[in-house]
Amino acid sequence: MHLVLVETAGNQRYIFATRRRRENVGASELLRRAGTDWVLDALRETAGVELRREDVLDPGRNGPIERTGSPEVVYLASGKALLLVPQREDGVAIVRAVTERTLREAPGLQVMGVVSPELRPVDRISARELAETLRGVHAEARALRARRTSPAERSPRLPVVAQCAYGGWAAEVLVRDEEGGQRPASREVACKSDWGLVREAYRRMGWDAAAQTNDRSAEESWAAIFHADGNGFGRLFLRFEDHIDNPGGSARTYLDKLRRFSTAIDEATNAAFREAVLTFGGPERAEALPLVLAGDDVTVHCEKGSAALDIAAAYLSAFERLANDPGAQGGILREVASRALGGARLTASGGVVLIKPHFPFSAAYELAEQLCAEAKRECRARGLAGVSALSLHVLFDSSATSLDDIRRRAEHDGARLYGSPYVVSSDGAADGWLAAHSYDRLRRAVRAVLQTRASADGDEGVRAVPTSQLNAWADAARLGKEQCDAAYELAKHRYPEATLKDLEGDAGSLFWTETDPEGRERHATLLVDALALARISDRREVADAAAPSADDAGRGV
């Protein structure tokens, strides 16, 4: 008996290699098929096993290998599959079938497979021995990934060849463009943009394929990338045998619970995304493309940037609720959480970066991933790994796209000009750090910035606090808390109708005081965050709606 791992690599680079929506969607669909449909097709072709994805949990269709003597699927996900096969040759044949198909139908996508050393039958091996072998398989996959050359080396540029019109590869075919003409394209682009593939992907995402083109929304001046990842899920899978009720150490119990746990997380992720976009009328009305929904890993391209943050918060909140459903897959999620997290809830963190539509998506994804890591790090350092939180940045200035550079430029004299991460869990209503970093508090601050009043001549659209005044306070904030407090105290009495308390941190100040994880005192404000988000949310062209001017580099949130 052998374990077989089939796994993709460089997923985000592959999806965002071009800016055209059609190729983004097609790449997402090819990535999904590589870990699901193509693995099932390989099983049928090499071992005669007929399975559908929905049969994986059915012991009658996907029977235990020790009883059937046939390959058994442990789990399938977008870009990843794990199986048990009776002979090494069976595993090699499956890997060969999937990788050869990838070369034909998804050139540029990196797919690799690992077949474990021989194991004793499931009924004669312990859960710990099987888990150790699985860890070894993943380690070998990482080593294999490091040794592989880039797919770009398959596209030599010498001798001189025509260049792909959509990327830096060598052109091999001609594809029809939006104007009805033909343009040179690489095989990678041609495969991603196949209309039959893209139509199926749109259908699966809940969009009307017939109405789609490669054009971005003409009305929206901002787009967004949202990336989310489960908190501590890597550790859960790494030592899964320690987190389940398995008194006899049975390998069969380990396998069955691993399959149920993986399936339950995948179901929670997909259901949470559907629930998050329903508020906006569905994924198409929300202009949210779920390019990766695999396990606890999520990447969404929001073409309507103004809706991105609410979609992200709704997703994290829904995922936390669904992932802690005591009835999901026979209670396996609660069982694992209670043992691994000491009763804490299964949660996720996210990163949202709002960008201009022509900003490179690959760079935006990297920043969203760094923001997600920031949210995880800040909460974990405070012993709050059991809360869902997100970090955000509005990229007004693209001269700095590293989060370290962005945050360094937005910190002045012990004061932070940003409030991330923001907690979306219900615990965010608590006191102290959680209350200061509540996502609901950020939303109230944005409403305070956008608040209007009736003017003397009856105009209802006048800002309760002029944007010029808010920007003046933001400029003062970059000089430090004391200067900002003085400027705020000097001017706040002019705006009695404004709900300024929603912008305040400590009483009478736009900053609040907190301690960092090392115990040092620092100050933070969400004014700059609120100003930037209000600019994106407010669709009116207001004369005084200048960009937040807390610093050219600190303009981003």
Image (cartoon, helix red, strand yellow):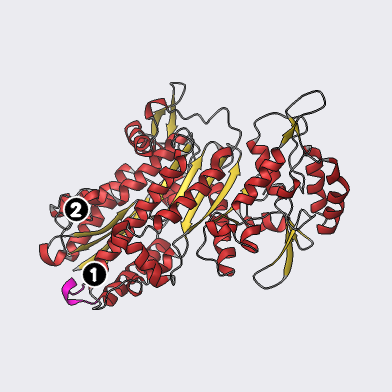
Residue kind at label 1, given as amino acid type: Thr
**Tag on residue 253?**
1
Q: Quadrant of residue 451?
A: top right
348 to 360, vertically: above or below: below
Q: Is residue 122 located in the magenta-colored stretch of the structure?
A: yes
Label 2 vs 1, first from the N-terminus = 2
When the figure is inspected, residue 134 is found, relative to residue 150, above or below; the finding is below
Left-right relation of 331 to 406:
left
Pick the front one: 433 or 273: 433
Q: Where residue 70 appears, x then y in whole percent?
A: 13, 60
Residue extending furthest toward the left: 68
Report the magenta stretch's main SS.
loop
Residue 5 visible in rendering:
no
- 478 vs 111, left or right, is right
Report the disc number at residue 216: none
Other-residue count near label 2 (Cα within 10 Å), few / some / many at <14 / 14–19 / ≥20: many
Observer-nearest residue: 499 or 70?
A: 499
Q: Which residue is mark 2?
A: 43
- Residue 29 position, x and y percent, is 36, 42
Quarter of the figure with residue 161 = top left
Which residues fall within the magenta stretch?
119-126
Q: Is residue 127 above or below residue 167?
A: below
Residue located 32% across and 63% down the image = 332
User: Does residue 36 appear to the left or right of 265 in the view shown?
Assistant: left
Which residue shows up at 25% across the image and 51% down it?
Answer: 39
Q: Amino acid at mark 2?
A: Leu
On the picture, is 430 further left or further right than 90? right
Q: Are the two marked residues, 2 and 1, in contact with CB atoms closer than 8 angstroms? A: no
Image depth: mark 2 or mark 1 in front:
1
Under circle 1, the secondary element is: helix
